[in-house]
Image (cartoon, grey):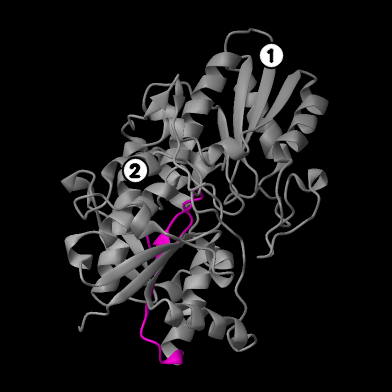
Amino acid sequence: MEKLIGAAVVGQSGGPTAAINATLAGVIRASFGEGARGVVTALYGMRNGIEGLLEERLIPLSEIFAAPDGGADEEKLSLLSQTPAAALGSCRRKLPDPAKDPALFEKLVKIFKERNIRYFFYIGGNDSMDTVDKLSAYIASSGYDMRVVGLPKTIDNDLPGTDHSPGYGSAAKLIATEMQEIVRDCAVYTVPAVTIVEIMGRDAGWLTAAAALPRIVGGAAPDLVYLPEAIFSTPAFLADIRAAFEKKPNLVVAVSEGIRFDDGTYVGASEQSGSTDVFGHKYLAGAARTLEHIVKNEFGCKVRSIELSLPQRCGAHCMSLTDMTEAAAAGSAGVEAAILGATGCMITIIRASEQEGYSVSFETADVRRIANKERRVPAEFITERGNNVTDPCLDYILPLIRGEVPLKTRDGLPVHFTFD
C-alpha cells in the first residue's frame, strides 16, 4: 500500500487509568520510530479528547518529546508512562450520528485538512470506540484519505475482541492488594463482624473478581464475592453469611456496584440518585450500604460498608509492570498498523496458549464489532452458587498483575508528568 504522509493526532477518552499514559507514550515513541520516519510528519495531542479537537486545543507532542538525536526523549516518556490518569485530559462526549449532524463531522475534516492530519488515534473503552467507529465511517465516505485507529483502555476489562484491556491489570492488582489488607485488618478481632467492600463494575464483574486473587497466592481473600453476571438473591446472601459465620467470626464480602436482583433492579437502587451520563449510564453506588443494612437487621452484629471508589482507577503506586508494558506496546502497535494501512479498527491483545507460557501479540479488529458492546465474565468463571469466582478465573487474571514498576520519586512521593 502506498504510504500516507502527514501528521497524526492522539487523544484520550473516558475514565482514566494507571496505564493510559503508557499507551500515549507508546504512540509517541512509535511516531519517532524508524517505520514512521518520513511518514508521520508531526504528532498532535488533543486536550480533552474529541471535545478538545473540535475546539482545536492541540499540543505539539512531536516537539515536546523530541530528543537532540532526532528520536524520542525516553526520560520524558518513562515519566509519562508512570503517571496515572490522562495526561492530555479526557472527555465523555458522544458523537451524534453523522447523518443527523454532518456539520460536526465536516468541521473535523476541515481541521484535519488544515493541519494535514492523516492519522487519528483514540485511547479509550467501549464508548470511545463508538467515536472511532463513527469517525472512521464518515472519513471513508468523505473522500479524505485518513486512517482512524482505536487503542484499548478500560479498567472494567469489558472490551470484546481482546483477551484483556490495558488498565485492567493495574486496577486488579490494586484491588487484590487492598482486599488482602482489609481481610488482614478485620481478622485481628474475635467479635462477630461483616465488612462489605463495593468495587466498580456496572455490568461486568472483572474488577470484583480480582478481589479473590489472594486465594491462589497464599494470601487473605474475601469470604464471598458477588458479580453482576450472577442474579443476586437476598435470602441466598443471608444464607451465605450464616454459613460463613459457622467457620469464623469476621467476614469480608466483595460486591460489584452493579449487582442486580432477578427483576433487573440494582441492589443499591435506593441509595442512588438516578442521574445518568451522556451515554445513558446510571451513576452507581450504594450496593454495599444497602447490604450493610440488610446484614445488620438480620444478624445484629457489627457491620461496615466500604466503597473503594476512585482510587481503583489510577493507583499507579501499585501499577502492574505487565500492564504498563502491554499498554505501551498497544500504542506503538496502533501507529505501526495505521502506517501499514489499517483503519476503522481497534488494536487487540491476543494471549498465547497456556502451553507456551504467558505472552501476547497484537492484532487489529473491526471497531464496528466492538463499539458499544460489552464482554462479561463467563459463567465458567463463577461458582455454581454465584457467591465467588473459580480458580480458572483467577488463573486468567494473575499474569496481568505481575511485575513492579520502579517509580521515580521525590521526597518519598511519585513524580508525575504534566503538560501544564
Question: Which residue has dot 1 on it?
Answer: 192
Determine which of the numbered discs, if any, sits on residue 76 in the image.
2
Q: Amino acid at mark 1?
A: Pro
Q: Nearer the viewer, mark 1 or mark 2?
A: 2
> Picture coordinates of residue 167 (x, y %)?
44, 47
| Residue nearest the viewer, comparing 82 with 343 | 82
Q: Residue at x 57, y 15 (%)?
A: 185
What is the secondary structure assignment of the residue under circle 2? helix
Count of picture labels: 2
Residue range of the region highlighted in magenta in the rendering: 142-163
Q: Residue at x 48, y 52 (%)?
A: 154
Q: Is residue 130 above or below residue 30?
A: below
Instruction: Please check the rendered image and state whether residue 157 is part of the magenta-colored stretch, yes or no.
Output: yes
> Picture coordinates of residue 402 (x, y %)?
32, 34
Q: Residue at x 43, y 27 (%)?
A: 214
Residue 306 occupies which quadrant of the picture?
A: top right
Q: Residue at x 37, y 69 (%)?
A: 8
> Picture coordinates of residue 80 (x, y %)?
39, 43
What residue occupies the far front of the structure in this picture?
Answer: 68
| Residue nearest the viewer, comparing 104 with 172 | 104
Q: Amino acid at mark 2?
A: Lys
Q: Is residue 308 above or below residue 283?
A: above
> Picture coordinates of residue 58 (x, y %)?
49, 63
